[in-house]
Image (cartoon, helix red, strand yellow):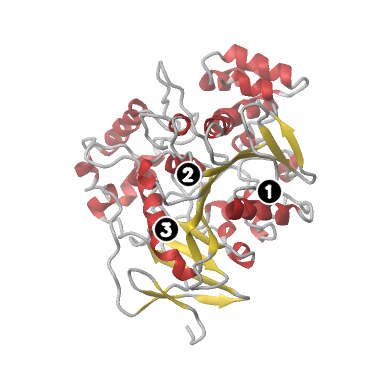
Amino acid sequence: MNDHDPVVTTDRGAVRGTLADGTAAFLNIPYAAPPRGPGRFAPPRPHESWDGVRDATRPGPTAPQSERRLGRVDMSAYFGPGRIPGDDYLTVNVWTPETGSGALPVMVFVHGGGFVAGSTRSPMYDGSAFARDGVVLVTLNYRLGIAGFLDLPGAPANRGLLDVVAALRWVHENIAAFGGDPHRVTLFGQSAGATIVGGVLADPGAAGLLRRAIVQSGSGLGAFTTEQAARVTAAAAGALGVAPRADAFAEIPDDRLLAAADGLAGLDLRTPAHRDPLLGLSPFSLVLDTQPATSVAAGAGAGTDLLVGTNTEEGNLYLVPVDRYTTSDAHDVDATAARSHPDPARLVGTYRTARPGATPGELRSAIMGDALFGAGSRALADAHAAHPASTHAYEFAWRSHALDGLLGATHAMELPFVFDRTGLPELRGPGALLGPDEPPADLAARTHAAWIRFASTGDPGWDAYDTRRRTTMRIDAEWTQVDDPRGAERRAWT
């Protein structure tokens, strides 16, 4: 620390950050109390105040999580360092070009990771580029896995989502001191984080805490039913040898909870009335009686501007790195459709007609991508478009040539461009997310600017989405505005 480091006073005490190249950064600021012991299964509580000035110059601990790998692709920039021990991990990082003005737009990011991994320490989520361009950027940690999302009698549901809402309340109460306008807050997230953003949009408890929302490769249809969640709870309780209640789980240390969660991978959550919205990729999601898209259609979030989109080849991330893309056959396509849709034969026929000449791997990836993200994102956009606030849609189409050119415009590909972090060494190379080639020179700047423009004005720079035209911006080396892209495939899900 030195005398030139910036100091800001929050409602719990003062924090000292760092200043470099005109950007002030404050790391590891608590927004809620440490979730210890039984507190891991309780609602987030206010953090104790502190005396003096708290050091906010170094990153802090992360939510308990197991190591996360996706085959041959290096996702270290996405998942970060994994578990960094410490109870006091319900924290935010803040980047700002100025403190005290209370006038700048604010963007609050919720990381992805299948509801079981990720943190603010992931190098992709450095907010310096946002601060450079006049935005206060906030990233946050939230409870993951069993602590965050297992549905337990005696505990509130969706504790990870409650953490995000608590962080938004912290932003509302404190962000003016960091230069941000608490009435110009945009909540944005990717993958699991985007599904959480959709859940916050539909949550009456978050009313007044956000002005705009961005859902990047999430799903408005991604929540588990209580019946599905009960299966996960029963399996976890059986693995741990305890009763399926919060008080019993509160006695279990984190290491055993993580091991039990790892053993739940691939659990079949299909019921006679509901498919598994995550196709077995994660045993955790939001648990809701009503899907977020349905709540939004009924008026939730009607006053919140929404930007929603997906990537062109979402499913590739779950096939290419584990060598299931080029080896896929017609049986694999049919099996994926059967897990995804009540009429799998019709679904496969629609995709074959829309994609003449597609390989089985391409068909399997397309169906998987829509089952996980596309159908639920379109449902959310359609639901929101009926209300007064603006709705905009995008499709990120730039193809990475990683993994022998097959990774493509896969899940998470837009993130380095949104954060303007394409120069990260961890993202470059034949086995890294962006691959061996140089991305188009202005793609990151233009994508990053569109997100900032939306956060500032509610308009990212293209026509609004409605259920007549379904206008979508296709983002690639060239940007092309298209109406109802892949309309036949969209209709197959409705």
Q: What x and y, as percent, mark residue 389?
A: 54, 41
Whole-angstrom CA distance, mark 1 to mark 3, is 26 Å
Secondary structure category for the residue under label 1:
loop
Q: What x and y, as percent, mark residue 464?
A: 65, 39
Count of picture labels: 3
**Crowding near the residue tagged with mark 3, few <14, some 14–19, many ≥20 C-alpha atoms within 10 Å:** many
Q: What x and y, as percent, mark residue 178?
A: 48, 69
Dot 2 amino acid type: Val
Q: Residue 34, relative to residue 239: is it above or below? A: below
The quarter holding residue 321 reads top right
Whole-angstrom CA distance, mark 3 to mark 2, is 20 Å
Q: What x and y, as percent, mark residue 295?
A: 43, 32
| 259 to the left or right of 198 | left
The residue lying at 28 percent from left, 49 percent from top is 43
Dot 1 amino acid type: Gly
Q: Which residue is mark 2?
A: 197
Dot 3 amino acid type: Thr
The residue lying at 37 percent from left, 41 percent from top is 204
Q: Which residue is mark 3?
A: 62
Whole-angstrom CA distance, mark 1 to mark 2, is 30 Å
CB under 8 Å between discs 1 and 3: no
Q: Residue 141, relative to residue 160: is it above or below? A: below
Q: Which numbered disc, 3 or 2, marks the residue that appears first in the sequence?
A: 3
**Crowding near the residue tagged with mark 1, few <14, some 14–19, many ≥20 C-alpha atoms within 10 Å:** many
**Crowding near the residue tagged with mark 2, few <14, some 14–19, many ≥20 C-alpha atoms within 10 Å:** many
Secondary structure category for the residue under label 3:
loop
Q: Which residue is mark 1?
A: 431
